[in-house]
Image: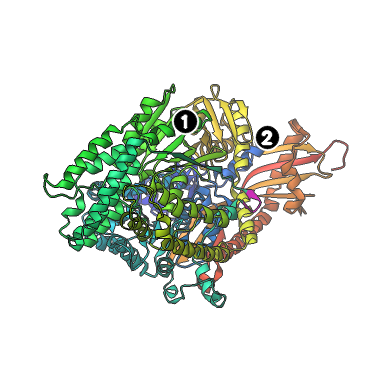
C-alpha cells in the first residue's frame, strides 16, 4: 500500500457514528446509516436525499465538525426568522414521528385515510381488505401503507396486482404522490425488463417495486416463478375478481388460486382493494377474508347474527368499509364530494327501426326454439340471439356488424363451458372480467355454416336494413343531441358510455357532423386502443375548452377522469347496475373540481330490451342505494338473472303476439323471477346495512386518530403552513403576488433570480399554485415534497447557515418587542437527529431521523425558567409590535451565545425526553403487543442537538424586563 494512503487511513480510523457531523470537501456533512470506517455515506447538512454520496476515508481528508452557532451580526426581522422555522419543518424527509413515511409524501392524506394505515400497523403481518366506497381514495390508502412499511424497513419490495388497464394509473399514483418508481410488468413489457436482469435473477428480484397484470402473471407459465420470488407485500386491486365461488369461471379461478398461494406465506403482507367486496355473494366475500386470516374460513356465513360477535371482532381487524357519509365530516374536517344530479332521458324507435326490431326478434325466436340441434348448438344459438338483440338496441352500426359477422362460439368444437365464458365476456356485463379485455368487441350472430343457409340470407337482408337506419332514421341518435347541447351550454364536459366499439365510433362520427358548435372537440376511446394511446387521446382532449369523450366500458373501471369531465351519459344501458356505478365513479368522486356532476340514463321507451334492464335492474339498484346510502350488488349471479328474463322474452311469448316487441303480458310471464330477485336483493341490502354498521371503523377510536393527526401536522406542517411559507419566501426573493384566495396563490416570478428558480425547478414566470384538491386548469398542486417547497426549504436553510450567502433571506437570530408578554422570553429553535433502531423478523433496521422543537425560557441563563408550549405559543401565533435592531439586538443575542455552554446540558436532556416521547408514540401506533420485550424499537438522540435559531422577545418599552 502507498505509505501516504496508509498514513491517511490511520489518521481517519476514528469511527464516525450515525448522525454525527464531519467536514470534508469544503462543507459539513451528516453521517448516514450503512456507513463503515472505510466508506462514509453522507448527506450535506442542509441538503436533500438526492445529494447523498459516499466518501472513501482512505482517499479524502475528513475531520469531525460541529454545528455553527448563530452569528449575532446576521440579524433578521420577525418574518425572516419565522421562515427558517417553517423551512426546517417542511424540509424534513426522515421525520422522527410514528409515521415514518409522512415526510416523503406528495399528498396530504385526509384524516379518514389514516384509519386503514393505523389498522394495518396493528397487524403483523399486515392483512387488510379496504372496501371503501367508489371515489373515496382506496388507492391512496393502500399506497400509504406500502410507503410506510418501506420507510420503516419492514419490507424492501412490493407488487401491485391489478387488471392490465389499471397498471399505468397505479404506476402514476405511486410516482406522483408517493415518490415510488414502479416498473410495469405486462405481456408487452416483460421482455425489456428481463433483458435488464442478471441471468440468475427474476424481474421481481431485480426491480423492487412493480405493478403487474394479474391476468399475465396468473397463467401456469408465469405463476411458479412469481410465487418463488414474489415480494413481501402484495396489493391486489379489484380484489373481488380473485374471490372463490363454485360458479366462477375458470379464468377467475386462476386469479383466486394465485392470490391464495401468495396468502399461504404467513409472513407476507397482503392488502386487498375493492369497492364491491361482496359482489352479491357472501361465500365469495368470506373467501377473500379467509385469505387474510385462515380462521375466517371456518366462521359462519352470517357474521351479523347477535351470537357471532366474537367472529365480527376478528373480521373487524382485517376489514374496513365506509360510505361517503361516513367520512364527509370526519374529525371535523369536511371532505367535499360533488353533488350528483341524476336524470332519465328517453327516445322512441323510428318506424323503420321498429320493423327491423320485429324481424330480428322473430329471427331470434326461430333460432332458439329450433329443437333439431344438440345441446352445444342450442346454446350457441341462444347466445347469438341475445347478441343480435343487444347490438340492435345499441345502434344500427352495431346491429349491422353483428349480423354480418360469424359467431366465434360456433367454432369451439362443442365446448359448452368455453362458449359460455366467451359469451359472458362479450355479450353480458359480467363482473368476473376486466371491463377492457375484449368486452366491447361485437360477438357476431351468424351461426350458418354455408352461404346458402336461409338464416344467413335473413341476416344479410337485415344488415342492409340496419345500414339504411344510419343517421336520420336513428331516433336514438337524434334525441340525444339536445341533452348534449344543454350540457355543453351549461358548462359540462360529458363522457358518453357505449357498449360496443362500433357504436362508439358511429356515434362519434355522427356527433361531429350534427353538433355545429364552434371549437367543440369529440374523441372516441375504445378497447382497440392500447392503454398508452387511450391516455394520450384523453390528455389531448382535456386541453380543449369544449370537449366530449365517447368511449366504451374500457374506461369504466379504476381510471380517474374527474379532472377534465363532469357528466356521464349512459348511451347504452349496462346489463349490470354495478357497471353503471363504475362509469359514474369516473367523475363522481373526491377531487372533482365541479360542485355538481350530471348523470344521464338514456333508454328507449318502446324498446323491450331497455325496458327489462331499466325496470328490473337499474331502478331497483337506485332505490336500494338511495335508502342505504351505498350500492348493493345483485345478490345472485346477474348473468343467470338476465338469461332467465330474456328467456321469457324469447321463449314464453303469449299466442297472438309474436310480432310485438312489447309483448303483452310479458311482466306476468317473468313476474315470479323478478319478485324473487328483488326479494333477495332487499334481504342483501339489510345484511349490508348491518355489516357496515359493524365494520365501518370499529377497531379504531376517533380520539386515537385525532391525537396522531395533530402530532403529524405539528411535526411536518399542513397545507396552510405550506401556503404561508411559499408566499413569504417568494416575496423575499422578489416575486409579486398577482392573485390570492384561500386555495391558491398566483405569482409573477419575472424578477426572481434564476438560481432560485433552478433550485425550485421553476420554468415559468406566471405561476398559479394550489394547496387543496380539487384543482382548476393551469394550477399546480403543491405539497411539502413538491420540488418548489423542497427547493426553497433547502435553499433557505443552507443559505442561513452560510453567513456570507447572498440568498440568505431566512435568519437564525432576531430580537423583537411585543405586548403579549411582561418579561423577556427567549425562544430556541433546535434540530434533533435521532438514531432509530427497529427489529423486524430478527433483522435490525437503522434509520437516521430528524425532528425539531422550539424551547422557551425566561430569567437568567444561570437559572432559567423553562416554559411549556402553552405558555409560549402566543409568541408563535402573533406578530411582534416592532423589531429591535442595532447594538441592543446584538447584545441580547451575544449574551446568550457567551453563556450557551451553561444551558447546553439542559438541551441535551430535552433531546432525551423528546426521544422517549417519540418512542411512546411509536409503540402506541404500532401496538406494543406486536413486539417482544427485547425487540422494542430504540430511539437514541445524537448529541448535542443543533441550535439553529435564537429569538428574543422583549416587552413593550416601559415594562420591567
| Residue 330 colored in magenta in the image | yes
**Residue 305, position in %: x, y?**
54, 74
Q: Nearer the viewer, mark 2 or mark 1?
A: 1
| 19, above or below 492, in the image | below
Residue 155: which numbered mark, if any?
none
Q: In this view, does 418 lie to the left or right of 875?
A: left
| Residue 386 colored in magenta in the image | no
Residue 534 in sight here? yes
Question: Which residue lies at the image location 61% right of the left edge and 57% below the top edge?
Answer: 708
Residue beneath label 2, please? 79
Question: Which residue lies at the image location 42% right of the left edge and 70% below the top edge?
Answer: 290
Residue 209 in sight here? no
Q: Is mark 2 on a helix, strand or loop?
A: helix
| 601, above or below 915, in the image | above
Residue beneath label 1, please? 482
Q: In this view, does 807 lie to the left or right of 457?
A: right
What segment is highlighted magenta in the picture?
329-333
Predominant SS of the magenta segment: strand
Amino acid at each position: 500500500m502507498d505509505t501516504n494512503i496508509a498514513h491517511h487511513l490511520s489518521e481517519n480510523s476514528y469511527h464516525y457514528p450515525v448522525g454525527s457531523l464531519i467536514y470534508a470537501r469544503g462543507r459539513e456533512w451528516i453521517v448516514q446509516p450503512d456507513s463503515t470506517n472505510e466508506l462514509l455515506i453522507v448527506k450535506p447538512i442542509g441538503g436533500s436525499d438526492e445529494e447523498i454520496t459516499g466518501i472513501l476515508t482512505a482517499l479524502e481528508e475528513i475531520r469531525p465538525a460541529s454545528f455553527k452557532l448563530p452569528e449575532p451580526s446576521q440579524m433578521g426581522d420577525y418574518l425572516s426568522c419565522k421562515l427558517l422555522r417553517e423551512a426546517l419543518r417542511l424540509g424534513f424527509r426522515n421525520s422522527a414521528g410514528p409515521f415514518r413515511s409522512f415526510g416523503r409524501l406528495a399528498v396530504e392524506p385526509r384524516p379518514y385515510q389514516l384509519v386503514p394505515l393505523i389498522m394495518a400497523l396493528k397487524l403483523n403481518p399486515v392483512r387488510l381488505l379496504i372496501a371503501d366506497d367508489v371515489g373515496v381514495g382506496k388507492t391512496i390508502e393502500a399506497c400509504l401503507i406500502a410507503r410506510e412499511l418501506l420507510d420503516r424497513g419492514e419490507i424492501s419490495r412490493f407488487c401491485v396486482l391489478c387488471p392490465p388497464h389499471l397498471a399505468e394509473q397505479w404506476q402514476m399514483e405511486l410516482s406522483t404522490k408517493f415518490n415510488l418508481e414502479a416498473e410495469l410488468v405486462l405481456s408487452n413489457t416483460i421482455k425489456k425488463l428481463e433483458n435488464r436482469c442478471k441471468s440468475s435473477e427474476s424481474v421481481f428480484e431485480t426491480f423492487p417495486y412493480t405493478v403487474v397484470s394479474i391476468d399475465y402473471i396468473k397463467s401456469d407459465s408465469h405463476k411458479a416463478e412469481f410465487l418463488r420470488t414474489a415480494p413481501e407485500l402484495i396489493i391486489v386491486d379489484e380484489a373481488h375478481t380473485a374471490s372463490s365461488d363454485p360458479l366462477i369461471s375458470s379464468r377467475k379461478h386462476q386469479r383466486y388460486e394465485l392470490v391464495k398461494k401468495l396468502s399461504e406465506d404467513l409472513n407476507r403482507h397482503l392488502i386487498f382493494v375493492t369497492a364491491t367486496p361482496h359482489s352479491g355473494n357472501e361465500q365469495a366475500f368470506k373467501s377473500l377474508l379467509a385469505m387474510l386470516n385462515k380462521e375466517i374460513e371456518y366462521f359462519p356465513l352470517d357474521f351479523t347474527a347477535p351470537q357471532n360477535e366474537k367472529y365480527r371482532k376478528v373480521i373487524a381487524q382485517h376489514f374496513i368499509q365506509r360510505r361517503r357519509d361516513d367520512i364527509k365530516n370526519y374529525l371535523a374536517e369536511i371532505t367535499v364530494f360533488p353533488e350528483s344530479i341524476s336524470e332519465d332521458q328517453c327516445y322512441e324507435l323510428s318506424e323503420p327501426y321498429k320493423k327491423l326490431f320485429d324481424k330480428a326478434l322473430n329471427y331470434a325466436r326461430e333460432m332458439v326454439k329450433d329443437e333439431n340441434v344438440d345441446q352445444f348448438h342450442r346454446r350457441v344459438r341462444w347466445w347469438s340471439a341475445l347478441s343480435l338483440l343487444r347490438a340492435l338496441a345499441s345502434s344500427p352500426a352495431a346491429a349491422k356488424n353483428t349480423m354480418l359477422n360469424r359467431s366465434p362460439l360456433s367454432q369451439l368444437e362443442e365446448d359448452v363451458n368455453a362458449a359460455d365464458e366467451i359469451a359472458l365476456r362479450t355479450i353480458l356485463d359480467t363482473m368476473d372480467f376486466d371491463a377492457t379485455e375484449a368486452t366491447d368487441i361485437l360477438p357476431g350472430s351468424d351461426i350458418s355454416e354455408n352461404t346458402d343457409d336461409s338464416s344467413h340470407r335473413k341476416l344479410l337482408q337485415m344488415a342492409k336494413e340496419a345500414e339504411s337506419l344510419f343517421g336520420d332514421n336513428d331516433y336514438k341518435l337524434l334525441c340525444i343531441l339536445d341533452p348534449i347541447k344543454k350540457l355543453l351550454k351549461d358548462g359540462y364536459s360529458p363522457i358518453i358510455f357505449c357498449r360496443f366499439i362500433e357504436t362508439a365510433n358511429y356515434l362519434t362520427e355522427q356527433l361531429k357532423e350534427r353538433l355545429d358548435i364552434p371549437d367543440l372537440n369529440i374523441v372516441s376511446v375504445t378497447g382497440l386502443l392500447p392503454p398508452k394511446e387511450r391516455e394520450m387521446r384523453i390528455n389531448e382532449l382535456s386541453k380543449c375548452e369544449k370537449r366530449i369523450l365517447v368511449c366504451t366500458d374500457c374506461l369504466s373501471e379504476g381510471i380517474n377522469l374527474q379532472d377534465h369531465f363532469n357528466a356521464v351519459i349512459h348511451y347504452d344501458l349496462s346489463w349490470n347496475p354495478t357497471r353503471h356505478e363504475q362509469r359514474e365513479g369516473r367523475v363522481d368522486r373526491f377531487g372533482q373540481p365541479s360542485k355538481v356532476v350530471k348523470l344521464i340514463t338514456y333508454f328507449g321507451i318502446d324498446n323491450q330490451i331497455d325496458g327489462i334492464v331499466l325496470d328490473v335492474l337499474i331502478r331497483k339498484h337506485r332505490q336500494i342505494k338511495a335508502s342505504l346510502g351505498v350500492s348493493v350488488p345483485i345478490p345472485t349471479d346477474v348473468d343467470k338473472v338476465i338469461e332467465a328474463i330474456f328467456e321469457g322474452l324469447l321463449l314464453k311469448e303469449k299466442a297472438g303476439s309474436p310480432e310485438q316487441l312489447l309483448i303483452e303480458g310479458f311482466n306476468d310471464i317473468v313476474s315470479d323471477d323478478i319478485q324473487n330477485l328483488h326479494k333477495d336483493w332487499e334481504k342483501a341490502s339489510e345484511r349490508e346495512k348491518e355489516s357496515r354498521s359493524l365494520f365501518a371503523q370499529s377497531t379504531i377510536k376517533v380520539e386515537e386518530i385525532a391525537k396522531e393527526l395533530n402530532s403529524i401536522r405539528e411535526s411536518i406542517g399542513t397545507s396552510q403552513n405550506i401556503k404561508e411559507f411559499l408566499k413569504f419566501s417568494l416575496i423575499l426573493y422578489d416575486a409579486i403576488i398577482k392573485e390570492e384566495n384561500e386555495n391558491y396563490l398566483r405569482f409573477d416570478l419575472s424578477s426572481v433570480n434564476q438560481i432560485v428558480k433552478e433550485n425550485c425547478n421553476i420554468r415559468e414566470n406566471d405561476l398559479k399554485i394550489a394547496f387543496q384538491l380539487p384543482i382548476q386548469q393551469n394550477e399546480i398542486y403543491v405539497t411539502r415534497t413538491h420540488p418548489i417547497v423542497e427547493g426553497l426549504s433547502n435553499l433557505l436553510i443552507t443559505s442561513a447557515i452560510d453567513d456570507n450567502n447572498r440568498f440568505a433571506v431566512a435568519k437564525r437570530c432576531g430580537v423583537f418587542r411585543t405586548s403579549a408578554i411582561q418579561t423577556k422570553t427567549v425562544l430556541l429553535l433546535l434540530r434533533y437527529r435521532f438514531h432509530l433502531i427497529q427489529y423486524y423478523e430478527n433483522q435490525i433496521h437503522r434509520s437516521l431521523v430528524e425532528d425539531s422543537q422550539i424551547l422557551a425560557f425566561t430569567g437568567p441563563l444561570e437559572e432559567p425558567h423553562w416554559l411549556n408550549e402553552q405558555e409560549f405559543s402566543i409568541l408563535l401565533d402573533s406578530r411582534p409590535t416592532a423589531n429591535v435592531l442595532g447594538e441592543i439586538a446584538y447584545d441580547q443575542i451575544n449574551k446568550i451565545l457567551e453563556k450557551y455552554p451553561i444551558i447546553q446540558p439542559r438541551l441535551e436532556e430535552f433531546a432525551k425526553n423528546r426521544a422517549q416521547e417519540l418512542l411512546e408514540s411509536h409503540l402506541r401506533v404500532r401496538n406494543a403487543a406486536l413486539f417482544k420485550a427485547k425487540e422494542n424499537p430504540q430511539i437514541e438522540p445524537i448529541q448535542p442537538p443543533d441550535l439553529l435559531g435564537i429569538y428574543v422577545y422583549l416587552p413593550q418599552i416601559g415594562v420591567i424586563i
